[in-house]
Image (cartoon, coloured by chain):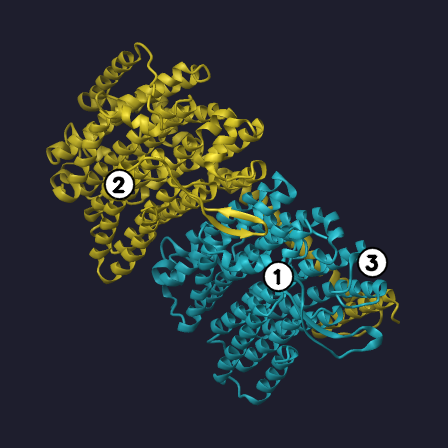
Amino acid sequence: MNPVLMIVAPIVLSGVLALFLKKDTPIIKYIALGFFSFMLLFSIKLLSSLPKVGYLDLAKMLTVEKWDFVLSLQVDHLSVIMLILTSVLLILVTLSSWTMKGSVGYFSLLIFFAGPISGVFMSTNFLWFFIFWELTLVPMFFLVGIWGAEGRIYASIKFFLYTHVASMFILLAFFLIYKETGTFDMTLVKESMLASPVLIWWLLFIGFAVKMPIFPFHTWLPDAHVQAPAPISVLLAGVLLKMGAYAMIRMVVLLLPQQTEAFSWVILTLGLITLFYAGFMALYETHLKKMVAYSSISHMGLVTVAIGTASYAGLSAGVYEMIGHALIISPLFLIAGFLHQRTGSWYIKDMGGLMQKAPYLSTIFVLAGLAALGLPATMGFVAELSILIASIERFGMGMILIALGSMIGAGYIIWTFRRVIYAEQSTLIEKSDFKMHRIEFLALLLFALGIVVFGLFPSLLFDTINTAFVALSTAGGIG
Amino acid sequence: MVASLLLLPLLGAILAYLLGLQNKKLAFWVAEITGILLFMISLILMINYTEPIDIPMTWFEFGAISIPFGIYIDQLSLVMLLIATGLGFLDIHFAHDYMSDDPHQPRYYAKVLFFIGGMILLVSAKDMISLFVGWEFMGLASYLLISFWHEQKAPADAGVSAFLFTRFGDIFLFAAIGLLFYFSGTLDLMQINAMANSGTLDKDTMFLIAIFIFIAAIGKSGQFPLFPWLMRAMEGPTTVSALIHGATMVNSGIYIVARLFDFYTVAGALIVVASIGAISAFIGATSALVQSELKKVLAYSTMSHLSIAFVGLGAGSLVAGMTHLVNHAVFKALLFLGAGAVIMSVHHVKDMWRLGGLSKKMLWISIFMGMAVLSLSGIPPFSGFYSKDAVIASAIINPDTTGLIAILVTIAGLLSMAYIGRLWVLTFRGEPRDKSLFTQVKTPSTFWIVLPLAIMAGVTLLLGFVQTPLAQMLSGETSVKMHHVDGLVLGLIFAMSILALLVYYFYIRRLDLTAKVSKHPLMKAIHSVLFNGYYVEYLIYWFIEHVIIQSIAKTMHWIDQHLIDASINGVVTLAKKVSKVFGYTYSQKVGDNASAMAIGLFFLLVAMLLGGIV
């Protein structure tokens, strides 16, 4: 199959579906599920055909001589890992949106999203990368703006504007690179060819930092998360933020190793601030979903620290945490959204005693929460441990601070358990019905399964992730 | 053999839960059988012991770093294993009656097995990673078991307290893993000891790491200042208290110091261990004196006696500390299960002031508990006598600990006679103070309740006669010298006799006088300080509430809302104003989009200019 289809097909398909299917036709869900499963198979097949080191060429087309405007698709281990993560999450998002209203529009947008996101991970031409990067915003904008909660308009516009402005930094950097090297091909650009690597580094860093998000560019996220429908929060946290982290690794750390080395203190400091700052925000938060959102940001702080190490071990740990974060934070978002849907309240103070009313749901909430605070036998622990060790190896013993971050995590998570899951039932919980659709519950179960299986057997993931950065091991660090 | 020891608890837990869903009684039987099997395996390992079982394993590799997960079982581990599985089994057996009315038995037994499994992993750990995993499993299991009756507020709060207090310690252990990796390059416990002995590590670094690990031990073993969770944990089922205080959790803190004893010795951190131990011993013993709840007395007494074991280690005597830990584990589990039997029989009344005269109703239980009382007080020939004496003697002999530390631990040792005597007398002797309750006392079952107590009482007595072999096993050496100080035993016994007389006088003969004395304002003030555990919990909670949440977190929240987010909104407003200046007419609705495009076009233009494309 031509890999370009992986980008074009969902865009065309979504258009066709949106035009020809009647509103709320149930078949759309199966089409979405089928398509995302196909995408997963496609990505797995890519993984099996990858060379040990370097890129696998997929396609080169649409050449415009003068501008170096070539749609060149190439993948390596890192991009295929991201593709697999994305397709798995899209499947799970579809499952957890099983009872979504206005389904044709909703699922069409989801399918559409699969196109540009594949493009982001596959294209090695800066311009095309940028086009796909921007295109992912479109479906997200509508998904939040139409299917979101009360304040969805404000949130979606803020989200769009904020990340769009950030994209301008990225575009600026791309043009600078073109001006200085004469190519948009990211596999050809070397740091030594650049005349102003410092400026480019900062532009790219800020551009991607907004997406991840890193303090102080994080304020768009809690709003977007709160207003987005729960499955879209999963997509935001699991895919959109990871896009930022992916780009940060690929275009900041791997492309500009010397600048990254020089500015590693910037990444490290901001990562640590994000970790603690968002942790304290979560501690103070009374809004359940916002609490989860800040917890998510806090974990991205950990990813940032890992990326800041720019080492073989650190980047591997960081990518593991990216996957872990996606699996851990998603059920928390889904359950927070579900509680709001059934009780009508966002606030923790209105909850209580959920364990008596919905024991299975609560158990998954507890499991995901424990993973978020880094309990062994979950992905959270492996991620924290490996990031701790990798960052200590790179930055020295001061990095034991990371351990303190997990204390704050324990604080807000255990205290949330106490107020939401345990103790007497609140009146709101008592009179609400928590019967969940089978398939939506299945999605939660799969998340929980992933958290435990990959937490007990991290090698299942690390074997592949290590390969992605194995080039760094021979180089003796970065560069 | 070893694999089954490690995996059986997990398997049992899953099976107990799943089968328990079909039939509640099945959950119990699965747990009972798993419990006895675990004990048998530990026993067989002990009998066949020739040399340490050493199984190095790798858990996973990231980058070029590999994370180990090894198993190492020597005699020290085996003694801890026997305690965990033996007492654990008796505890499960006892729960048959104690938990018989509970609708959630499958969940209960599953968690108990998981708990025991965590302890097994911890004491069989070869490296910091497997140790930490076991450590955290126990933290989780204790959280779930303490808040087992999570429908009520108090147990739910107690669970939070247990998790967070111990977690605070745990993060230091986690950080210690990082430090050890950084400085020594190994996480293997035996190698860490070996490196300490060979002097390859910097002493200050070792001291720091030792303190970090000790903070974790403080959390788990309920030492000052992280002890309040131990008292709150009394909200859980009494069988869980017995498990936490006797068989498993609190022992782990002492075990880890004993496991890294060489490291602690070389690092010069033992004096810190001894000091914290002495302070905690004193706080625990004095607070136990005034508690009115049966279980609270026992909880403070646990704190105090673990501290005595810590002082033993801190004074440089591994043997004294560890034998005291072993002896304590048995008699404390016995006391807790005895208390459980009492509480069950009096319809869950825990206030000792409503009991009294119960030995008429449950003679055997009062005798067995009495044996534990004698052992805890340190009366020969019971086991507690030997180890407590050895600890005090070591503290006196060691020049580092000979002053205040020795005095504090001696006071704590003596006071244990007073508080535990008070507990026993108030519960079993004298006249029943609540007549109607007394008439409704249920008789506990012989097989399910009295039998486990009898076994533990027998072991407590027996242990007194095997202290030397036990000490040899714990230290792994054939000749062990227990410290003795001339005249110490005589002095202690003399002091204890006086205390015993005082207890008799104040709590049996002249209870009215006690009531009168306690009305005095000064006594009241002292009482309330002791009763509330020196207000340590209040201070910690005050700090969390007012400093961490209401100051730090609140300030950050304000900054987020009013500075960071506001500045972004400010930029947007500015952009709108700019577009107005340029004469664009706009409606509110399209305004945001318009400004977005304006900004976008602006940047694009700059980009193109810079790129030299236009």
Where residue A202 sits: x, y (%)? 76, 55
The chain letter under disc 2 is B
Residue B374, by quadrant, is top left
Identified by mark 3, the residue type is Leu
| Residue closest to the eye, B299 or B517 | B299
Which chain can be seen in cyan?
A: A
**What colour has chain B?**
yellow
Q: Which residue is mark 1?
A: A221
Kindly indicate the quadrant of the structure image that contains residue B308: top left
Tell which subunit mark 3 falls on. Answer: A
Residue A440 in sight in this render: yes
Q: Residues within 10 Å of mark 2 (few under 14, many from 20)?
A: few
Please, is residue B566 above or below residue A59 in the view?
Answer: above
The quarter of the picture where the N terminus of chain A appears is bottom right
Residue ID at (42%, 69%): A442
Q: Amino acid at mark 2?
A: Ile
Extreme residue toward the bottom, this view: A20
- Nearest to N terminus: mark 1 or mark 3: 3
Q: Which residue is mark 2?
A: B44
Q: Nearer the viewer, residue B61 or A276?
A: B61
Which residue type does callout 1 highlight? Answer: Leu
Q: Determine which of the numbered discs, if any, sits on residue A194 in the image.
A: 3
The correct choice, above or below, for A469 with respect to B123 in the image is: below
Q: Secondary structure at mark 2?
A: helix
Compute the Cα span from label 2 to label 3: 70 Å
Residue B564 appears at what percent x and percent y? 68, 54
Outermost residue, top direction?
B487
